[in-house]
């Protein structure tokens, strides 16, 4: 008996064909374009910072005045700084502070952005317009100037203070995206039903609003981590961030002027290289999330 080939027809034949696609192929499609090099490098840096005690070969806070500004060698892998501290150990130890500031500042800014943007999106036209005008006014001012101004008012310098200052000055862009997403779904039946049943703002935000816009802001959340780390490094380089005794990648770069004058290139190059590589990896991952989200929106 001859076998005959049949072709599926009908309104649902495409969905049936998609259902027949092997799961492994679907997973490969989702991984397409993922920056594996960036993920691997960033994971290695983060793990090294988190478990720095297992990586360090010297006390990063110890000032060995007999070995000041020693170039990289077998004893000091990355050399020492102007105060005789081992740069290799400082990189991993200080990386924890820089990563903490990036994560804490981003967490605070995301929280403010989600609440502010949701309130604006659910409010009446004139309230929404006023809140967005305020956001645009703040965005028109260079963020580094706002950070410097607030930091000068607070006066105290520490990881928590720096993270707080950066966090309260970097929420505006995310809030605009949240507001746009909320405006699109504010009149959906499930939102109106939740309001009818006396659902509070935070209940509606958690149960109905957040799941609808979390994917849209995720790439900005990731890139904000890198921006916060870069801002801390800028503040420390300018001398208004973390003090020298608080080790971070930014505070390590605060001695760049002295290192340049004495031609001690490793004091600048190595911390700067770790900072740049981390920021590039975070940016690549953020761009991948953005492209994947845009691709998903086009498929919808």
Image (cartoon, rainbow, N blue to C red):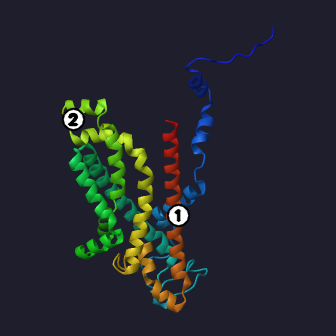
Q: Quadrant of residue 141?
A: bottom left
Quadrant where the N terminus is found in the figure: top right
Residue under numbered circle 1: 280
The mark found on residue 199 in the picture is: 2
With respect to residue 70, does 173 lie above or below? Answer: above
Please state if 148 lies on the left or on the right of 38 as rendered.
left
Q: Is residue 166 visible?
A: no
Q: Earlier in the sequence, mark 2 or mark 1?
A: 2
With respect to residue 263, does 251 lie above or below? Answer: above
How far, Cα to Cα, is label 2 from label 1?
Answer: 42 Å
With respect to residue 92, does 265 lie above or below? Answer: below
- Residue at position x 54%, y 78% in the image: 269
Q: Which secondary structure, mark 1?
A: helix
Q: Mark 1 and mark 2 in contact (Cβ < 8 Å)?
A: no
Percent of width and height locating residue 64: 46, 86
Please state if 177 lies on the left or on the right of 282 as rendered.
left
Q: Is residue 190 visible?
A: yes
């Amino acid at each position: 008996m001859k076998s005959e080939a049949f072709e599926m027809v009908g309104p649902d034949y495409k969905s049936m064909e998609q259902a027949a696609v092997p799961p492994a192929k679907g997973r490969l499609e989702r991984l397409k374009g993922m920056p594996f090099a960036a993920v691997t490098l960033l994971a290695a840096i983060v793990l090294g910072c988190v478990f720095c005690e297992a990586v360090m070969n010297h006390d990063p806070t110890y000032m060995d005045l007999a070995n000041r500004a020693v170039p990289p060698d077998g004893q000091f892998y990355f050399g020492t700084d102007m105060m005789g501290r081992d740069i290799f150990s400082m990189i991993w130890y200080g990386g924890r502070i820089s990563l903490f500031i990036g994560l804490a500042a981003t967490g605070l800014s995301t929280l403010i952005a989600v609440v502010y943007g949701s309130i604006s999106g659910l409010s009446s036209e004139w309230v929404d317009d006023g809140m967005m005008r305020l956001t645009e006014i703040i965005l028109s001012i260079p963020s580094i100037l706002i950070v410097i101004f607030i930091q000068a008012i607070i006066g105290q310098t520490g990881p928590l203070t720096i993270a707080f200052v950066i966090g309260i000055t970097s929420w505006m862009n995310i809030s605009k995206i949240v507001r746009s997403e909320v405006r699109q779904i504010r009149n959906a039946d499930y939102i109106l039903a939740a309001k009818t049943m006396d659902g509070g703002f935070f209940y509606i935000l958690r149960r109905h609003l957040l799941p609808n816009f979390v994917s849209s802001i995720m790439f900005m959340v990731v890139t904000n981590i890198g921006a916060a780390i870069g801002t801390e490094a800028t503040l420390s380089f300018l001398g208004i961030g973390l003090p020298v005794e608080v080790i971070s990648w930014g505070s390590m770069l605060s001695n760049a002027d002295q290192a340049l004058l004495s031609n001690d290139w490793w004091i600048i190059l190595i911390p700067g290289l770790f900072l740049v590589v981390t920021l590039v990896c975070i940016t690549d991952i953020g761009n991948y999330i953005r492209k994947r989200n845009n691709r998903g929106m086009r498929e919808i």
